[in-house]
Image (tube, rainbow, N blue to C red):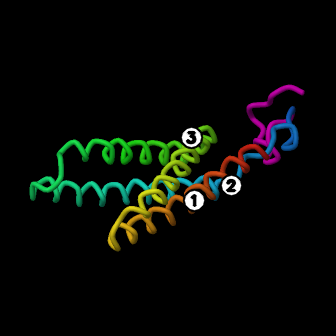
Amino acid sequence: MTFDPYKAPDPAGPPDHSHAEMGQLPNRTPFVLAAIGAGLASLYWAGLTLLIALGVAMGSVSALQILLPCVLIVLYAVRGFQIFKGDPVAAKRILWLHGIGGVMAMIQMGSGNTLLIALQSIKIAIHIFGAITAYLAMRSAAAA
């Protein structure tokens, strides 16, 4: 079949490929939800970093304790942006971040006061949401 530049394009797609041959695109909803989970984790760490900075300003906390939360803010934000763009590899990497973060939160809950337990509970809820949506995004990409 020859290409005719004066003819309107076929709405069914290119004449030499059907939609079944071109493959289906993955569902965007799990990727958007996983990106929201990563964004929530990043916002959580930003809030916690502000509390640590307040402790540094008051002199009760070492300034070095701000470094890890800053790294985590960047990791979650970058992975969230990559997931939002539809990268299934980033979904797998953030699944690891959520898993490790959730386990660490559970460990820290055992050695803390009521405020620390409440903060870690919020963190665990964010990690569960993020991990489930990241898994669904990976599964959606694998099915496509």
Q: Look at label 3 and name its amino acid.
A: Arg
Question: Is 6 within the magenta?
Answer: yes
Q: Are marks 2 and 1 in contact (CB under 8 Å)?
A: yes
Secondary element at image label 3: helix
Decide if residue 94 is on the left or right side of residue 6.
left
Q: Which corner quadrant of the image does residue 133 belong to?
A: bottom right
- The relative height of residue 56 versus residue 64 in the rendered view (above or below) is below
| Mark 2 or 3, nearer chain start | 3
Disc 2/disc 3 C-alpha distance (Å) = 13 Å
Q: Residues within 10 Å of mark 1 (few under 14, many from 20)?
A: many
Q: Residue at x 75, y 35 (%)?
A: 6
Where the C terminus falls, by quadrant?
A: top right
Residue that badge 3 annotates: 93
Name the secondary structure under disc 1.
helix
Q: Judge from the rendering whether residue 110 lies leftward or rightward of residue 53; answer left or right.
A: right
Pick whichever of labels 2 and 1 is earlier in the sequence: 1
Asked if marks 2 and 3 touch (Cβ < 8 Å), the reply is no
Is 104 or 94 nearer to us in this picture? 104
**Residue 75 spot, x, y in % from top left:** 42, 42
Span colored in magenta: 1-15
Verify CB contact (< 8 Å) between mark 1 and mark 3.
no
| Secondary element type, mark 2 | helix
Residue placed most toward the observer, 76 or 119: 119
**How far is the residue under mark 2 from the one under mark 1?**
9 Å
Marked residue nearer the N-terminal end (1 or 3)? 1
Q: Residue at left 18%, top 53%?
A: 61
Residue at (76, 41) in percent of width and height: 9
The span from disc 1 to disc 3 (Cα, nearest Å) is: 15 Å
Residue shown at 87% from the left, 37% from the top: 21
Q: Quick one: label 2, few (<14), some, or many (20+) residues within 10 Å? A: some
Which amino acid lies under the numbered mark 2 shown in the image of this protein? Leu
